[in-house]
Amino acid sequence: MKNLIAPLTALSLMATEACAQPDQQIRVSNVGTQRAIQGAAENFTGAVRVEGLFKGDAPARIGGGTVTFEPGARTAWHTHPLGQTLIVTAGVGYVQQAGGVRQEIRPGDTVWIPAHVRHWHGATATHGMTHIAIAEAEDGKAVTWAEHVTDAEYAGASTPAGQ
């Protein structure tokens, strides 16, 4: 028994020391503590609210936030260097890949957008939509923005060719 106690005590001390390092402690961000901002007009059409939820510390590259689109609001065309996951939490929206069909998304739906795939997402014309967006950054950049989605593209009448 004596031979078992010494290694367990050493393990306990190592765990305590690891927790004492500030960059090795669990961090909780309480709901409502992250500042929400209006979506930038150069990247969004309509009223959009963006709330950053988390950003991993290096070497992690992951970050995420909640994005709320009022009816008719949407992103501009854009890509992500390492892809993006959307988790719809409220309302009804659309997602569309360039050259593809506009797809309706609803609460509980999860959308995976592969790396470098040109796309947009947003609310329908009659319903708002909220989703959690999760993406990884490559060389410090998680998104590359392009031009706005036209009203015809948003309505599903046309879509530019692309990746």
Image: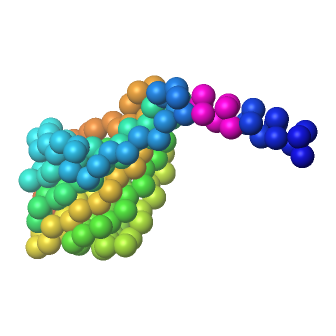
Q: Is residue 41 magenta?
A: no
Q: At x 52% / y 29%, what residue is drawn?
A: 20
Say which of 25 and 16 sits in front.
16
Say which of 132 and 2 sits in front.
2
| Relative height, residue 73 to residue 81 (above, below) | below
Q: Is residue 65 left or right of residue 6?
A: left
Q: Is residue 70 left or right of residue 93?
A: left
In the image, residue 1 lies at what x, y percent? 89, 46
Magenta span dominant secondary structure: helix
Q: At x 68% / y 37%, what residue is drawn?
A: 12
Q: At x 74% / y 36%, what residue is drawn?
A: 9
In the image, residue 71 lies at what x, y percent? 11, 65
Q: Is residue 144 left or right of residue 83?
A: left
* Residue 107 showing in the rendered view: yes
Q: At x 41% / y 27%, what residue is drawn?
A: 140
In the image, residue 113 lies at what x, y percent? 44, 54
- Range of magenta residues: 12-18
Say which of 145 and 53 sits in front.
53
Say which of 26 and 55 sits in front.
26
